[in-house]
Image (tube, grey):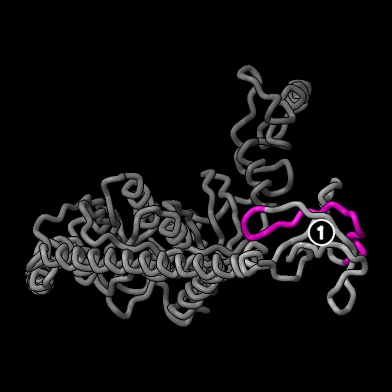
Amino acid sequence: MPESAEPISAGPRGHSPGGYGPGGYGPAEGPDETGADAADGARASVPERAAETTPDNPWPLALLSRKLKEHIDRSPQVWIEGQVIEFNRRGSNAFLTLRDIEDEVSLSASAWGQVMDRLKDPLERGSRVVALVKPEMWLKTGRLNMQVRNIRPVGLGDLLARIERLRHSLGAEGLFAEARKKRLPLLPHRIGLITGRDSDAKKDVLRNAALRWPAVHFEIREVTVQGPSAVSEVTRALRELDSMPEVDVIVIARGGGSLEDLLPFSDERLVRAVSDAATPVVSAIGHEADRPILDDVADLRASTPTDAAKRIVPDVADELARVHHSRERLERQIALLVGREAQQLALLRSRPVLANPGHMLTARHEDLERLLARAHHAVNAAIVRGEDAVRHLRAQVRALSPQQTLDRGYAVVQHLDGPAAAVVRSPDDAPAGTQLRVRLAQGALAARSEGPLDQHGTGTHPTTPSTPGDQEGKPHG
């Protein structure tokens, strides 16, 4: 390496080119015999630890630099990734500055010519590389340097492979599921637009949206859309618009570019921010062939910024035509409905019950009179049948009555005395001299039994013949 850039070696422990002796505590030539005691006192007075230093007893600068270098020399080598923003090769040495891919952080690095000669293609500014570096400190200037021991450019294939691995990982988490995607409003009142400063994408979205719906309003955030600061600026703008309740939809728009230019829109931090947003997000990055991960997580993917403008707001001409067509259909339907109802009303009015309402009352009156007549006839017939039944029963009762028997000339002979007034049924029930009561059809008479008659009809005693009908079962008179 050149003399001006060569790191300064610490040399044997306790010696340095800074002019200090062993341990950095005295001059390089060491103490003489007369100053030995003074040097020993000086070494003893310097603190051993940094925490023990004071304003009255500080460390020499060379001691601090030497200790820092010893600490950095113990650091292991590490693979890092960055972008080459400065590159200068002078002879067998190369000097470059690497910047972080996402943050505004850069480091100086140097490499031997043989390391750079192993590359197939020479490095250029803007190249993305991975390098194996070993930190070291240049003691004379106190400058930190990264000694490059191996370096490899990151090709498009490597970037695509990383993007696909991240896409697969986020998809496995469910960030791209259709169930998570939110529907866009039919007519957003205010649209949030995140785009580059004075970019063509911004002009395309504003112009095409205004042509389709002149009353559209935008809340615009102009940010960096490529480079290390793009992810943080886009994410910050997204969160700011998402916190505004008047914003109904957010559009992230950028024109076409190389794969490296579109890398911020495949960054995991931005992808997760879009997934967490409560407002619907439309991705309008690059052209149809470009497919950053932002397209997968967004609620709607537009192929271009112009396509995004067409999909977030309706076309006023189409909407007016649709309203006109709907109005015509509505008028036809109303006319058909009114016509059908008018026909139904006319049909109802033509019916007799509505044409002559009294006809219904007359018919019901006639039905009532007819029913009343039938009722009277039925009642009279029932009464006649009842009277006939009563007469028949009365005739039966009379035919079976003892009085009817008496009316035919029979009499009933009973004992005159006795509580039961028993009926005489046999001559043995009324021996001679028995007082009898003879019941006739009308009235009764008293009699006395003379005893039973023989089989010829004469009495057993020569007595006065008994009165005819003195025994039951014989006609009297």
Which residue: 21% across, 59% down? Answer: 187
- Asked if the magenta segment contains residue 103, the reply would be no
Locate residue 99, reporting x and y percent. Answer: 44, 58
- Residue extending furthest bottom? 120
Task: Return the residue nearer the eye: 141 or 325.
Answer: 325
Q: Classify residue 322 as left or right of residue 371.
A: left
Which residue: 90% across, 63% down? Answer: 451
Which residue: 63% across, 36% down? Answer: 64
Q: Classify residue 29 as left or right of residue 94.
A: right
443 lies above or below 385: above
In which quarter of the view is residue 21 placed?
A: top right
The residue carrying pointer 1 sits among few (fewer than 14), some (14 to 19) or many (20 or more) residues within 10 Å by Cα, namely some
- Is residue 261 among the parts visible in the rendering? no
63 lies above or below 225: above
Task: Return the residue nearer the eye: 78 or 297.
Answer: 297
Task: Return the residue nearer the eye: 439 or 92.
Answer: 439
- Is residue 429 among the parts visible in the rendering? yes
Q: Which residues are magenta?
A: 427-443
- Asked if the magenta segment contains residue 433, the reply would be yes
Locate residue 183, reporting x and y percent. Answer: 34, 63
Amino acid, disc 1: Val
For the C terminus, the image quarter is: bottom right
Residue denoted by label 1: 423
Task: Return the residue nearer the eye: 304 or 175.
Answer: 175
Q: Classify residue 170 as left or right of residue 248.
A: right
